[in-house]
Image: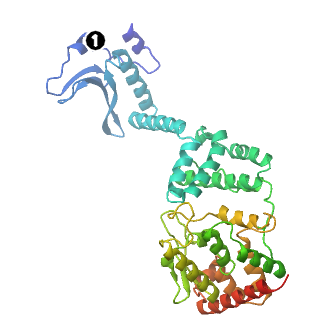
Amino acid sequence: MLVKFYQHSQYGNFTNMGKLTDTKLRAMKPNGKIQKESDGDGLYAYIGAKSKSISWQMAYRFENKQKVLTLGRYPEVSLADARRKCLEARQVLADGRDPGLVKKSEKEAALLAEKEKTLTFETVAQQWFEKQYAASPPVTAKKIQWHLGILYQHIGKRPFSSLERRDIVEAIMPTQERGCIDTAHRLAQIANGVCLFAWGLGYADRNIADRIGTTLKAIPRRHRAAITDPEKVGGLLRRIQGYNGAGLSVKYCLNILPYLPLRSEEIRLARWDEIDLENAVWTIPAKRNEHGGGMKMRVAHTVPLSRQVVDLFRELKNIREMNGGGELCFPSPRSASRTITAEGLLAALRDMGYSKEEMSIHGFRTIFSTLARENNLNPDHIEKQLAHKEQNAVVEAYDRSQYFEQRRILMQSWADYLDSLREQKA
């Protein structure tokens, strides 16, 4: 009956098939030699010289080249299944296609489909995270993972290939609806980074999150709290000078900070080996450790020190040396190996009576930027002292000047000005 099916099937009249039987196949045993037993029409059972099992092979010609197609192993692929596969391959050949190439492409397509099932948004995002943030400070890495966690709740287990732009938007919208506009925009930035990464690796044919932030509400403009009225600045300086409520490190850090409008991390993590008191210069490194801890823009910054700052640092160093010394200028009172925190500085300001709407640690930079300009000090020197990145890429490429000597004059003038404000009567 099986032979009759082959003789009258849709594949044509293959009367040469049917020479093999299961009895013959079971009789084939590996003997260290190549063995072939033909079933007809190119199909044969094959045992190689080093083989331990029978495989099905089909010999055929395509574009005048002799080729072989493997159809599986016996008995996993039965004799009947082998004949069926041979007939299907012959039909592909009759259609003018190479059965070997068709099988290869089908196998690749199946592997790709299986891979796409396991290549979820979360797996791609983790690859992106390892690439972009492996060497980032722990605090930064933790924040990124927290934001990714929000996206994972909505699309983490979805196959990446199935995602559309609207899926990304719908994953972000609940955050916006809760009024967290800043967080929603950060989610959009991260999603864009992940999708751009996926596009670059060939996981997608486009970046489905490109400019997705344009679908969100605009971020409200905010300014960090700062006192900019000269009279009130004088009052702030007097309160700082008289404050003794949070330990030595906080006291001296807050007294030095107005003279040197640095970012919180740049001053809190200061080390004595960075500061040359004899030459009145502090060189803040681009990075203090593998996690950063130096300059925000990762470019070393030389800071000229006014007489007042040198005196404060000398006082602090003398006190430290009398109490055992240490590498850190502003160690935590709880651990000599750790520095004071930004929260500690903020708590001191609150203890002095300044609310979060009135004054922030970053506000000391605003005081310097605002009042120095109001006193007609050179804006280029001010920007260089603040270590701001040049917004114009062309200017940045050609302007390598550090204005060090000019900044030395600037910072001494600024320190004298602050002293005059402190000494004024309220």
Percent across and percent down for residue 352 are 76, 68
> Which one is nearer the viewer's eye here, 414 or 318?
318
Q: How many marks?
A: 1
Image position of 282 (left or right of 147)? left
Instruction: Please tell me whether residue 117 is drawn above or below residue 419 in the rendered image.
Output: above
Mark 1: amino acid? Asp
In this view, which residue lies farthest toward the left? Answer: 32
In this view, which residue lies farthest toward the right? Answer: 426
**Does residue 80 appear in the picture of this structure?**
yes
Indicate the quadrant where residue 70 lies.
top left
Q: Around disc 1, counting alpha carbons within 10 Å, would you say few (fewer than 14), some (14 to 19), or many (20 or more)? A: few
**Does residue 391 appear in the picture of this structure?**
no
Residue holding disc 1: 22
In this view, which residue lies farthest toward the top? Answer: 1
Instruction: Please tell me whether residue 393 is drawn above or below residue 35 in the rendered image.
Output: below
Percent across and percent down for residue 260 are 65, 80
Q: Residue at the location (58% across, 52% down)?
A: 142
Q: Residue at the location (53% across, 60% down)?
A: 136
Q: Quadrant of the C terminus?
A: bottom right
Instruction: Please tell me whether residue 383 is drawn above or below residue 60 in the rendered image.
Output: below
Image position of 306 (left or right of 322)? right
Q: Residue at the location (58% across, 39% down)?
A: 159
Percent across and percent down for residue 43 are 31, 24
Indicate the quadrant where residue 388 lies.
bottom right
Image position of 377 (left or right of 43)? right
